Amino acid sequence: MIDKVFGFIGCGNMGGALATAARRELAGENVLLANRSPEKARALAEKLGAQVVDNAGAAERSDYLFLGVKPNMMAGMLEGIRDILVSRDEPCVLVTMAAGLTIKAVRRMAGVDYPVIRIMPNTPAAVGKGVLLCCADGANEAQVEVFKAVMAGAGLLDFVEERLIDAGSAVSGCGPAFAAMLIEALADGGVACGLPRAKAQAYAAQTLLGTAALALETGAHPGALKDAVCSPGGSTIQGVRALEAGGFRGAAIEAVIAAYEKTLELGKQK
């Protein structure tokens, strides 16, 4: 196992998912969990075999310190551990997942010129099928490679320019909510046609999973995958017609743009 300490301040859905991924590669004593509600940290620690600490303990002991708090809470949280960060003998790598907050902003709030890895993960990371959009500043090659090795269990890691993080997160970070709505809608349609709820949901979820795998493995354009199912005069093309009449693709595009614009707005908040 990798002999580095990964500390997590914030054990919500995303912090918990990333801590779960880290625990696959790290010993339990090298995964530190801190949360505003200690009960949540204790519950996750019991599940993972990890350690519960407070924010100060995470800041003191971590080689990689994950800042899993909401953008409007970041400044206050970092203010509380600033003296500890400043007094460390060796800097840690700060890992921020706050939507809209740039690396420059996080450094300013922390009051230290530490290496920063900015990430935008998504909830499927909890089952190893997530997307982590990443960019780094000040981290050396060895630090980045350790991060990649520990986080590999979360899913696809893609390092991009920081200017692309917000746009990417509007697709991959917000996308699970949109995909879940589609699963629910398809299942509702199945129930309307007489399927039991459990079967309809299983069929819908597996269909999205399989179609995604087909797209990734073949590299085929989504339009080609759609066309392959649409026989002339068949059932599928009539369903496609109904989706187009309802503005399906336009609504999906607008959802991504709305999420992107909100992310930019969050980044402007102090």
Image (spheres, rainbow, N blue to C red):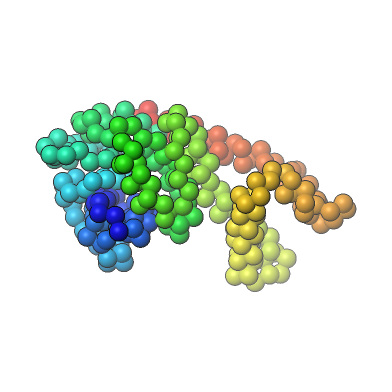
Q: Residue at x 68, y 70 (%)?
A: 195
Residue 95 image position (x, y, % from top left): 31, 41
Query: Is residue 181 depicted above or below 97 in this figure?
Result: below
Q: Residue at x 61, y 62 (%)?
A: 206
Q: Is residue 234 visible?
A: yes
Q: Residue at x 53, y 35 (%)?
A: 258
Query: Is residue 197 depicted above or below 37 in this figure?
Result: below
Please state which of residues 222 and 109 is positioned toward the viewer in this rendering: 222
Q: Residue furthest front?
A: 142
The picture quadrant where one finds residue 253 is: top right
* Left or right: 133, with 241 as reference point: left
Q: Residue at x 16, y 39 (%)?
A: 90
Q: Is residue 166 visible?
A: no
Query: Is residue 244 depicted above or below 29 in this figure?
Result: above
Query: Is residue 126 depicted above or below 85 in this figure?
Result: below
* Left or right: 2, with 209 as reference point: left
Is the N terminus in the top left, top right, bottom left or bottom right quadrant? bottom left
* Left or right: 235, with 141 as reference point: right
Residue 110 image position (x, y, % from top left): 22, 34
Please state which of residues 14 and 177 is positioned toward the viewer in this rendering: 14
Residue 55 image position (x, y, % from top left): 19, 48
**Number of numbered discs present?**
0
Is the C terminus in the top left, top right, bottom left or bottom right quadrant? top left
Please state which of residues 115 and 232 is positioned toward the viewer in this rendering: 115
Please state which of residues 2 and 166 is positioned toward the viewer in this rendering: 2
The picture quadrant where one finds residue 161 is: top left
